[in-house]
Image (cartoon, rainbow, N blue to C red):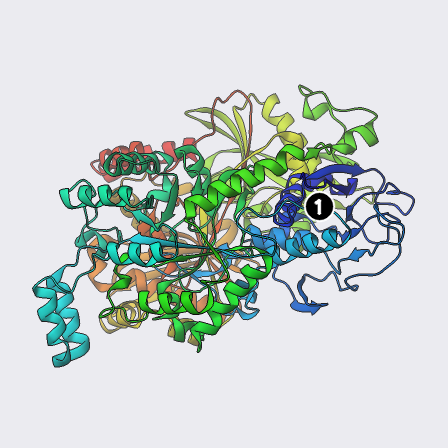
Amino acid sequence: MDAQRIRVGLADTLAPWAAEVKYVLRTLLRIAGYPYELVWLHGAGTAAGATEAVDLYYGPRGIPVQASVIIPASGRPFTVAPHLEPRRLYETDGLAFLDFGDGPEGTSRRGAGGATAANAEVLHLPNDIVFACYWLLTGAREPHYRRDRWDNLHLDGSFFLQSTLAAQPLVSLYGDRLRRHFGQQGYAALPLPWTTAQPAPAFAFSHDVDYPQMLRAIECLRLLATRGPAGLGSVREVLRGANHFWKFAEWMAFEHQLDTHPAFYFMARQGSPWQYATGTPDAFYDIRSPVFQELFDRLRDQGCEVGLHASYHAYRSADQLRREKDLLEQAAGALVDGIRHHFWHLDPIAPHETLRRHEQAGFVYDSSMAFELYPGFRRGICHPFRVFDPDERRELKVVELPPAWMDDHFDRRLRQNGITDPDSYARRLVDVARATGGTVIVDYHVRGMNHDFFPRYGQWLMQFVRAHVESAATFRSPGELARMYIAYEGKLAAQSRDLAGDGPLCEVRAGGAVAADADPLDVDDAVHGLGRPSAVGPLQPGEEQQWDAYVAAHPGGGIYHTLAWKAVTEEGLGHTPYYLRAVGSDGRFAGVLPLFLVRGLSGRRLVSVPMRDRGGVLASDAAAASGLVCEAVRLTRQLGCTYLELRSLDTMAPQVVGKYGLQCHRRWITTRIDLAPGTRRIWQALDRDFTRWAIRKAVREGVRIDLDDTRAGMETFYELFVRTRSSMGIPPFPKQLFVSMWHHLVQAGTAGLFLVWKDDCPINGLLTLRSKDTFILGYAAPQPEWRAHHPSDCAFWHTIAWAADHGFRFYDMGADSPQQIGLLRFKKKWGGVHQPMSYYYSLNGAQALPNFDSSSGTYARLRRLWTHLPLPVSKQLGAWVTRQLS
């Protein structure tokens, strides 16, 4: 029997976020088991609109709409999700809700006339669960959490951890509520493929093959160090090969008793102990060796699934993922559809970028979306789902199978997680999956069946499954679950219809749709739901004070938007400024956009701002932002530039991005330290055995740091800076740039120079910038020959403490390429949190986006050549090169 289609009415005021809204509603209705028909309700932003009958309505409160389910829209832009934490988690009628400031308004009421029955019960949800689900499904706050050296997320103090959201997957719970509500109204749903008449969880075993071949000498030493003489018996068994980690047969025997097949994820890249110790912790085995070839034959005979355990750095490249997939398929003699990353190591800043690379590499499913340190459901969902790509604003093709826990969660990490009863916590995860018809996927390493080394791994799992799972779950392999879900999703998609185009406002407000080839500069902003400021144009004489006042008042305004920075860039690099402002009908500024014309080796380009990692549009609303971008695109064409580049820390309004076809890329990430805890707590959080030791060693050896705001100090810093950059093979900026910064910033108190001395010799320097509540590391000049005295550690700590003691909230360490692993790790050790930068491009003749990634192979070769240049040549040539590439 076909499932009954749910007619979903969307208020047309939601058009700017159509992609995000549809993604969430599709996800919820897939969990509920209903196909859909999406329609726009025109005029639903007014009390007179939205009279059409639908089954589910999502839009503003207080609209007279006939619907069985009403979800009030907060009107909040979805782009602000990464900047929000819920105020609280509250419960109404047995269901929990996130309060982002919308305010609860009950969960259900009768009357109002649903679409199917005159007196049907209306499920009136208390707040905007669509926005809440988007916040969860995209991991909106994850870039703001602290990471350790292995990129593991530390959620200490986060709302997510404090509210135990990992144990209550709200997205699945909301989808299940819709299933039960519509079922009570007589709507036939499509059953989840692994359930029977009653909701039941699907339970899947999966096993990462990290360390199957024991390094006996190391394990014997480990046994003696941890157990002393009591470990001698185990040592003897290890030495004669009876105590080992090759436990494939034990896992297969256990899971075959449950009539299911295990999935083993093998690593195709062979690492080494040395690489492990130096930051690339890949496995040491060779899947092409005879012992593994024999194993693969046995696994095929037993019907086991083989997946890829992607190497630690494989997330960076679709080509690398494809190579590892091909190598494993050749060695295993089987297709490899699934993948799980070693250490769950997706892109540390943007996991969706890794999953996008999975698409390109040909994977069917991924099962990496979990927390290394915490059990539970990372993205608020215990069902298979599709991940949303916020950059491309689309659903990715790879199915995500969310793991529930791994072996370590209920063993070594119990105390860290505050879990006193692992059985109870695991039952909680199983019970919520059972109640919603979700999935429970567990990850146990192959060696976990060694009861001597890991008494709480395989042994505990077997006891738990037999006591709490065996009679109440369907056992499937991850690959089977993925294929079942894809077929289920396909049945729903075949019956679904999307009658809501991405731009209903084109039809309603402009009297007709916009032609596909229409020039966005000629299309009225009203078509995209945007007003237009009364005046957009270049900064006029006499408006300078108003410009800087607007920058100072705007939450996103910073030093790179100021007119002082205009003078620095113009004088120091010779770039021509084009400063645009939007003026509202009241005569006040409604937005600003600093732009510079850069005449470079690859042609002309318009950049906001060159040399530094951010700038971009500041605007009071989307209308002003649209006007500024419109004028910037016009200038790009008028000046014959190949492209426009807007560098920003924050994302732009999607309707502006959509109107002008801007391409967003996140090739750079910045690292920020939260200074709110204060100097003492920041110090205590530093690594005692190295970082604090290095700082104290520097002080003992006479390293000192002086704040020097003199012109002579800047001259000294520049000479250090030239030597540093030249030794690294990086062209130094021209001297005039630093002279201009001293004149316009240092003397004005918006920049400071810290010089590091050993006796009477300058050995390092930090040129820092002060931007509202943020202290920015601008330029550093460490001298490699003084590295043994740890001047960099000493200087970083001194400036961090100085900034915290002087009332700054953040210490910004600047942007780097994600490929610069060593530099990012150095910055992270200070408590830094990585945050992606949003760079927007409008191409005008360029065939591809620019890529000035200094970690690429081409730049590495050029660097090696540059190190051989004499310093005077490096100065002169560097001044010219940096003007071209800034």
Q: Is residue 200 left or right of residue 26?
A: left
Q: Read off the residue under disc 1.
A: 188
Query: Residue 104, relative to residue 725: is it above or below?
Result: below
Q: Label 1 is placed on what type of residue?
A: Ala
Query: Residue 876, relative to residue 48: is it above or below?
Result: above
Q: Nearer the viewer, residue 709 or 643?
A: 643
Q: Position of residue 157 (x, y in %)?
A: 51, 70
Residue at x-position 22% and y-position 70%:
452
- The kind of secondary structure element at disc 1 is loop
Q: Is residue 813 left or right of residue 106?
A: left
Please state the total of marks drawn on the protein image: 1
Query: Residue 721, relative to residue 826: is it above or below?
Result: above
Q: Is residue 318 left or right of residue 290?
A: right
Q: Position of residue 738 (x, y in %)?
A: 42, 46
Note whether residue 703 is visible.
Answer: yes
Q: Nearer the viewer, residue 543 or 776?
A: 776
Q: Position of residue 750 (x, y in %)?
A: 52, 56
Q: Quadrant of the N terminus?
A: top right
Note whether residue 808 is visible.
Answer: no
Residue at x-position 67% and y-position 63%:
97
How packed is label 1: few (under 14 Cα within 10 Å), some, or many (20 or more)?
A: some
Q: Is residue 115 left or right of residue 305?
A: right
Q: Position of residue 619 (x, y in %)?
A: 68, 45
The answer to which image quadrant residue 541 occupies is top right
Q: Residue furthest right?
A: 48
The answer to which image quadrant residue 567 occupies is top right
Q: Nearer the viewer, residue 726 or 714?
A: 726
The answer to which image quadrant residue 563 occupies is top right
Q: Quadrant of the C terminus?
A: top left
Q: Nearer the viewer, residue 149 or 359?
A: 359
